[in-house]
Image: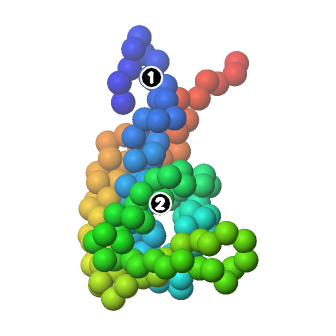
């Protein structure tokens, strides 16, 4: 952590150290959601917001639809118009066989990431102390 005059620098909410770049994991999250069954794009976005990785925020629907379109182009998902839902037609997305295989590969990749993150976290904690100490450094104490 950088210091200026002995005080810790405060980080903006968009700083990667706050976990905002975890949205890069949207593809395995979409594959996981669709492995439970077909869904409309709106429902996919809602389910993505339920994952802890989203920090309780619903993802940008435009980004979700862009991701779905890219995944459909790569044949990881397929879509069709759902005319039976009442109201205007909506796209219904399904996981393909290739999508299931991709999800299986993501599981292996995420397990490798998890091991690497655990190793990094152990090393970082040894250098800066416990997570609690790191979090308390940025807080002002009242005297």
Q: Residue 87, position in %: x, y?
A: 72, 71
- Say whether residue 107 is visible: no
Query: Which residue is pictured at 39% across the width and 14% down the height?
Result: 4
Q: Is residue 88 above or below residue 122?
A: below
Q: Residue 50, position in %: x, y?
A: 61, 64
Between 100 and 122, the one lying in front of the other is: 100
Locate the C terminus and report the quarter of the image it occupies: top right
Q: Residue 124, position in %: x, y?
A: 32, 47
Q: Quadrant of residue 73?
A: bottom left
Q: Is residue 123 above or below residue 9?
A: below
Alpha carbon separation for disc pair 1 and 2: 37 Å
Between 90 and 31, the one lying in front of the other is: 90
User: What residue sits right under mark 1 in the picture?
Assistant: 9
**140 relative to 62 in the view: left or right:** right
User: What residue sits right under mark 2 in the picture?
Assistant: 65
Between 97 and 7, the one lying in front of the other is: 97
Q: Residue 85, position in %: x, y?
A: 69, 79
Q: Is residue 3 above or below residue 53?
A: above
**Dot 1, crowdedness within 10 Å: few (<14), some or many (≥20)?**
few
Q: Quadrant of residue 140?
A: top right
Query: Which residue is pictured at 45% across the width and 70% down the height?
Result: 30
Query: Which residue is pictured at 45% across the width and 47% down the height?
Result: 19
- Name the N-terminal-most of marks 1 and 2: 1
**65 relative to 1 in the view: left or right:** right
Q: Secondary structure at mark 1?
A: loop
Q: Secondary structure at mark 2?
A: helix
Locate the N terminus and report the quarter of the image it occupies: top left
Query: Which residue is pictured at 59% across the width and 79% down the height?
Result: 82
């Amino acid at each position: 952590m950088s210091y200026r005059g002995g005080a810790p620098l405060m980080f903006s909410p968009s700083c990667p150290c706050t976990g905002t770049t975890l949205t890069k994991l949207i593809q395995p999250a979409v594959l996981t959601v669709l492995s439970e069954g077909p869904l409309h794009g709106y429902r996919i976005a809602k389910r993505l917001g339920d994952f802890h990785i989203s920090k309780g925020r619903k993802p940008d629907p435009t980004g979700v639809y862009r991701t779905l379109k890219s995944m459909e182009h790569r044949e990881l998902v397929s879509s069709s118009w759902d005319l039976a839902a009442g109201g205007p037609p909506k796209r219904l997305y399904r996981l393909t066989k290739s999508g299931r295989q991709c999800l299986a590969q993501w599981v292996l990749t995420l397990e490798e990431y998890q091991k690497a993150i655990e190793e990094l976290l152990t090393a970082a904690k040894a250098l800066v102390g416990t997570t609690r100490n790191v979090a308390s450094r940025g807080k002002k104490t009242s005297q």
